[in-house]
Image (cartoon, rainbow, N blue to C red):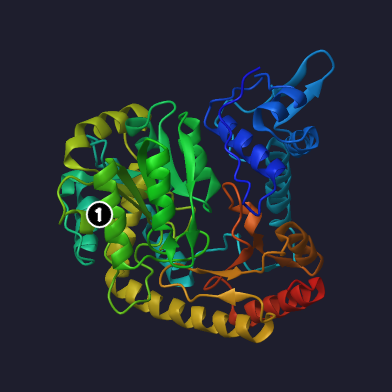
Amino acid sequence: MSIPFIHLDRASRVSLAEQIAQQVVESIRSGQLKAGASLPTVRSLSRRLQVSAETVQKAYRILQEEDWITSRTRHGTVVNPRLSPHVPLISPKREQNRFQLLARIKEAARLPGMFPLSGISLPPEEEIARILKQVASRAVEASWQVESHDPFGLSALRSKIQGLLAGRGFWTEVETICMVNGSQQAISLVAEQLLSPESAIGVPDMGYLPVLEAFRDKGARLVPIRHDHTGIDIAHLRAMCEAHPLRALYVMPHGQYPTGSSWSESKKRQVLQLARQFQLTIIEDEYYGELYYTPRPPLPLACLAQEEPGIEVIYVSSFSTILHPNVRLGYLVVPSVHIERFRRGKYLSDTVTSVIGQQLVLQVWEELELAHYLERRRGQLRQARDELLASLRRWLPPAYKVVPPEMGVAVWVYAPATFCGLTFFERCLQEQVFVMPDQAFAVVKPVRGFQVRFGHIPHAMLEEGVKRVGRILAGMGVK
């Protein structure tokens, strides 16, 4: 009945029982305590830590309430034998609650008559829809004429992507660009090629959970890194690099999902310095790449890394936000040293990304004059963002704060510490408002608040939805 070393800070404001419980959880997460492992008796642990038996009993109760441990007669206290084979990030009880929340969100998204403030995919923008229909048959016809398939995709489309990136100051060779079936496949391919079971990877503490599950599915250990409205917490990243042998770092430096935060150039360079110091491969996910609202396009980490040899950045982007989520097409920019490895991995995965899908995007690109369209679309979205921010400031209680996003199509509303996202979500449904709460994005502990999207529904509809949310929040009385 052994337990890893526990250090108690008797001057801390955190109770001794909570400190014991937290450190036991960390030992489970790190793999030091396996599912089914025996824990010391209350009496022996209290003697060892020189605390009262009541303190240890309280710590064990905290762990039992969250289903981290179980106690049975004649078997003693053990780590929950039913823990997931993946590295557990949140307690089994919270995992079950989150599973129920996500199921409820999926169900609610299909309810008629909702004000969809976040989380729902609607038909594509009118101009995009018209051109998709117009070029569809042409794309199918062109795809029959392609006889040999490079696993990295059509060279004509990759050349256009090369030009798009160059316009943002990021130069790369066509040979480094790999077409994929959306960002999800990109992340799975990266995980397959770079991570091994038990590899540790730093991830944002809030994010798109299916992407993060792609890392877990490969057996990787997720290490959440704190973020705030300015982006990644550099001090916490350094502390996690020192505490864990991180193999990689997954980041969204611009328009981070779901909060919309973007990093300063200074913060980007600090992250690159840490990547060099700790030999991290950076996986940069720029989901909203072309939808920026700053006077000049922000420079990707992959671009800045070119100035500092010895730093490896894999760049990921997608056409989903430009065209529609159902256009499952994205791309990777792979460091030259890994090209053959990724080419083989892509070939074994699915030979090549749908040629019809690639031709469709290529035909839309040419018909739409993409650069001019994006300039117009950014202007439309900037106006929609500003209208949403005005609505939020007009209707929400003063305790709720917003930060204008510099990229993307979502605003995060930061809530007070006593805010309960689950209660808020249910009350919104009662008022026919669909909004994604913090628990839907949290890797471990949520950043209190909720997400509101813009640019996908008329402003009058968005205004009414925000007005209803304001009434709900006022009724919750959170301060």
Q: At 37% from the left edge and 45% from the top edge, which residue is drawn? A: 249
- Asked if residue 428 lies left or right of residue 252, the reply is right
Please indicate, yes or no, whether residue 447 appears anywhere in the rendered image: yes
Residue placed under numbered mark 1 in the picture: 302
**Above or below — where is 197 with respect to 221?**
above
Which one is in front, 11 or 245? Answer: 11
Q: At 30% from the left edge and 62% from the top edge, which residue is drawn? A: 365
- As helix, strand or loop, the secondary structure at mark 1 comes to helix
**Above or below — where is 170 with respect to 155?**
below
Please indicate, yes or no, whether residue 313 appears anywhere in the rendered image: no
- Asked if residue 423 lies left or right of residue 277, the reply is right
Residue 15 % position (x, y): 70, 48
**Above or below — where is 399 with respect to 104?**
below
Which one is in front, 132 or 75? Answer: 75
| Quadrant of the frame with the C terminus | bottom right
Q: Residues within 10 Å of mark 1 (few under 14, many from 20)?
A: many
Which one is in front, 12 or 74? Answer: 12
Name which quarter of the figure residue 371 lies in: bottom left
Residue 377 % position (x, y): 40, 75
Residue 147 % position (x, y): 23, 35
Q: Amino acid at mark 1?
A: Ala
**Above or below — where is 266 with respect to 27?**
below
Name which quarter of the figure residue 347 lies in: top left
- Asked if residue 186 lies left or right of residue 393, the reply is left
